[in-house]
């Protein structure tokens, strides 16, 4: 316990307009509700609102990643990287959105659009190298130029490719048509993992899971999150009747295991550059990379499960 200060307390000045500043809890509630409404509404309304919303989300996540890399001394080409990420996202989305076209002019148009997006992504990737060549040598930079290119590509593999796999989840099933319920189910599983881990960790938590990365996480919390996520996986059978119980439980287990790993990876990233939050777009919640970090480890595994076993 620290000793009390001998100097008198200095009263804080009241705001000029006489209003009290909004508390952190109020900020979390208000912006959390706004974010949830935008998220669920975009997913529910249709495939294109889903795509536009998550394209913007993953672009902002990638921007936050590049900002953190700048804190570490790198100089990634953020605009080029974000353009490539959007091309990747919409290539996957268009492939899934129009997969039911078996032939005819519509199919040729879709294929032409996909090839155009892929070609643009490859050309922009070449521009990453040309950018470094034109700027070499940079002043006041300790890293080699290929490190900047590597950071750009790392952001695409870490953020953009996993988030692009959301379309694989959204267009799963026998009909291969957009099904908002599957994205809702994924969100419910992720939320149950977080809620279960928080509740069990607060109540029973004693053994630290990764104290050097995230001191607040415990093994008891991880077990609580795992169990509650499995319960949600079972309960989803009353809504997603076309999914078998084994598939739902495997998907729930995937979320419960790989979600916390995604969170730990992002915590390690933030600690490595000595920042608290990835961004400030959601007051009280941090950045979008803070909110969707679990998806970055969950989605690749769910996509593999979908490709191997269907569902």
Image: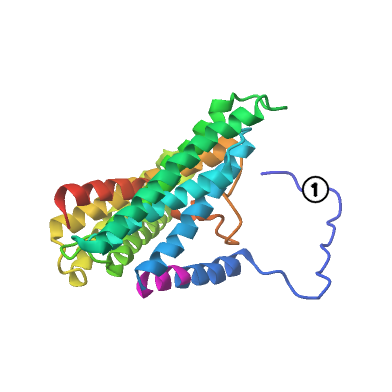
Q: Circle 1 — which element?
A: loop
Q: Name the residue that disc number 1 marks.
A: 5
- Is 123 displayed left or right of 145 in the figure? left
Q: Is residue 39 left or right of residue 283?
A: left
Query: Residue 227, position in %: x, y?
Result: 27, 55
Which quarter of the figure has residue 96? bottom left
Residue at the location (80% across, 48% down)?
5
Q: Residues within 10 Å of mark 1 (few under 14, many from 20)?
A: few
On screen, 87 above or below 146?
below
Image point 59% across, 23% down: which residue? Answer: 144
In magenta, the rendered stretch is 38-45
306 with respect to 292 (left or right): left
State the residue lying farthest toward the front.
105
Which quadrant of the figure has residue 199? bottom left
Is residue 129 depicted above or below 178 in this figure? Answer: above
52 inside magenta stretch? no
Q: How many marks?
A: 1
Q: Is residue 121 visible?
A: yes
- When the figure is inspected, residue 72 is found, relative to residue 32, above or below; the finding is above
Res. 204 in view:
no
In the rendered image, residue 120, in percent from the top left (x then y), is placed at 44, 46
**Quadrant, the N terminus:** top right
């Amino acid at each position: 316990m620290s000793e009390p200060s001998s100097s008198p307390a200095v009263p804080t000045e009241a705001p000029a307009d006489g209003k009290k500043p909004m508390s952190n809890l109020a900020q979390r509630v208000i912006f959390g509700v706004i974010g949830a409404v935008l998220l669920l509404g975009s997913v529910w309304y249709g495939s294109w609102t889903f795509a536009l919303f998550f394209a913007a989300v993953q672009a902002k996540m990638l921007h936050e990643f590049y900002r953190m890399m700048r804190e570490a001394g790198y100089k990634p080409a953020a605009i080029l990287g974000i353009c490539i990420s959007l091309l990747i996202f919409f290539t996957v989305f268009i492939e899934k959105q129009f997969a039911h076209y078996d032939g005819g002019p519509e199919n040729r148009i879709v294929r032409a659009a996909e090839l155009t997006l892929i070609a643009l992504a490859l050309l922009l990737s070449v521009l990453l190298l040309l950018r470094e060549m034109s700027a070499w040598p940079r002043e006041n930079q300790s890293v080699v130029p290929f490190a900047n290119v590597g950071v750009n590509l790392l952001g695409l593999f870490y953020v953009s490719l996993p988030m692009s796999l959301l379309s694989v989840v959204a267009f799963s099933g026998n009909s291969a048509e957009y099904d908002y319920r599957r994205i809702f189910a994924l969100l419910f599983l992720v939320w149950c993992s977080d809620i279960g881990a928080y509740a069990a960790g607060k109540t029973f938590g004693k053994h630290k899971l990764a104290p050097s990365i995230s001191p607040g996480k415990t093994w008891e919390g991880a077990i609580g999150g795992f169990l509650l996520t499995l319960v949600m996986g079972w309960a989803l059978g009353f809504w997603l009747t076309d999914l078998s119980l084994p598939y739902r439980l495997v998907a729930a287990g995937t979320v419960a295991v790989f979600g916390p790993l995604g969170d730990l990876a992002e915590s390690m990233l933030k600690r490595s550059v000595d920042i608290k939050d990835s961004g400030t777009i959601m007051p009280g919640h941090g950045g979008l990379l803070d909110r969707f970090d679990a998806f970055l480890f969950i989605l690749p595994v769910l996509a593999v499960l979908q490709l191997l076993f269907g569902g």
